[in-house]
Image: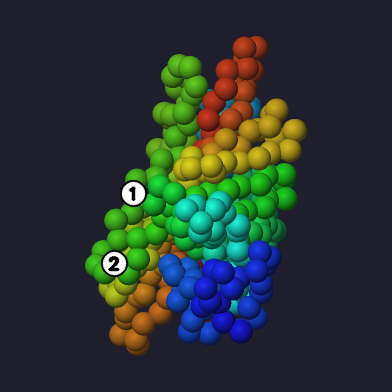
Amino acid sequence: MTIDVKITDLPYRIQVIEKPNAETTTSLGPLANLVGTWKSAPGAGWNVIAVPGTFPSAQNDQGFCLEVIPFLETLTFQPATIVAGNRGPVVNGTQEDQAIVGLVYEQTVISDCGTDFCAARGFPKGSVIHKETGMFLNITDFNNDLNVARLSIIPHGNSVLALGKSIEDTSGPVTIPFGSSSIAPIGGNLGYAEGPQFTIRQFPEFDQSNPNQILADTVSKQTLNSVTTLIMSTNNGTGGILNIPFIQNNVKAANMDCIFWIEEVADGAGQFLQLQYTQTINLVFPRANDPQKTPITWPHVDVNTLRKV
């Protein structure tokens, strides 16, 4: 079975193609090289999140704690390809339908942090700290030049729709943007963006004030034959995050921005596929010990470099 068919031939249901072929790969567009399993090496994946509260540590006298957690990740994009047909309006006698092609993914993140701090915070080495499932979609006939989407389900009680665009097959160096982990108060500067939690590294090899720097350091030493970039945000189009009531009322996940770089890397032994990403989810907490419950945006940043296995 192939998916290279006229939209009028595509029934308005879901089709699963168990063995993708060349035509399937073409229809996947910028997502084609994601198919398979990706794993990260020690020291490549990092989680940075600020959480409010009072903690028994010299570095935690500012009313919040900056958690920095190295992690290992397995990210699998199933070779089963999902095809969906969406019925659209009739315009000048022609039905304007839409074909969507996508991949099912599963993400597992395991703590690689052996410090007493990580253990005390509930993230001992070897523990699963995140699990996520969803789909990446290649969308045609979309609006505002948006052609890719990410649908995510997180067991804390969140459902995410991030929409974006792809930049395909560019060569040369990758420009990794600055990635801030600083806290953004809503309604005034509360001084949370300064202090030793951002300037004194918890791990010598990782700059928690700019988590993206470790991505830039990696590609600065490599030769890239091609790069496909996926830029997605819940702030685009009709995207957004839905939360269960407890999260909405206490730790609201407000928005998410993410960039994926699918890179073909050349080295002395040939070439290999590499996947880098940076992702920021903004969480809105009330300020600790604040009778007014002043809301503060506490960024949750994840970065990683993975190789296809």
Q: Which label was assigned to residue 7? A: none
**Front-most of residues 217 and 2:** 2
User: Who comes first in sequence, dot 2 or dot 1?
Assistant: 2
Which is nearer the eye, 290 or 121? 290
Image location (x, y in percent) of residue 24: 52, 78
Inspect the image, locate mark 2, and give the three-letter code of the amino acid beneath it.
Thr
- The residue under label 1 is 177
Q: Is residue 53 left or right of residue 192?
A: right
Question: For the view shown, which residue lies furthest in the bottom direction?
Answer: 269
Kindly report the distance in space between the C-alpha atoms of the residues bearing marks 2 and 1.
17 Å
Residue 69, x across and y down, in percent: 56, 51
Q: 1 or 166, which lies in front?
A: 1
Residue 91's spot in the image, x, y percent? 49, 52
Image point 51% across, 56% down: which residue?
93
Residue at x 33% of width, y 49% of height: 177
Residue placed at 29% from the left, 56% from the top? 175
Amino acid tagged 1: Pro
On screen, residue 204 versus residue 16, left or right, reads left
Q: In this view, does 186 lie above or below 78?
A: above
- The answer to whether residue 265 of the structure is visible from this angle is yes
In the orientation shown, which residue stands out farthest toward the top? 291
The mark lying in front, picked from 2 and 1, is: 2
Residue 107 coordinates in the image, percent (x, y): 62, 62
Residue at image position (36%, 82%) is: 271
Tags 2 and 1 touching, CB below 8 Å: no
Q: Is residue 221 visible?
A: no
- Residue hosting label 2: 170
Using the image, determine if residue 221 lies above or below residue 93.
below
Residue 181 position (above or below residue 107): above
Within 10 Å of the Cα at label 1, are there few (<14), some (14-19), or many (20+) other Cα atoms? few
- Front residue of this view, candidates 306 and 240: 240
Total residue callouts = 2
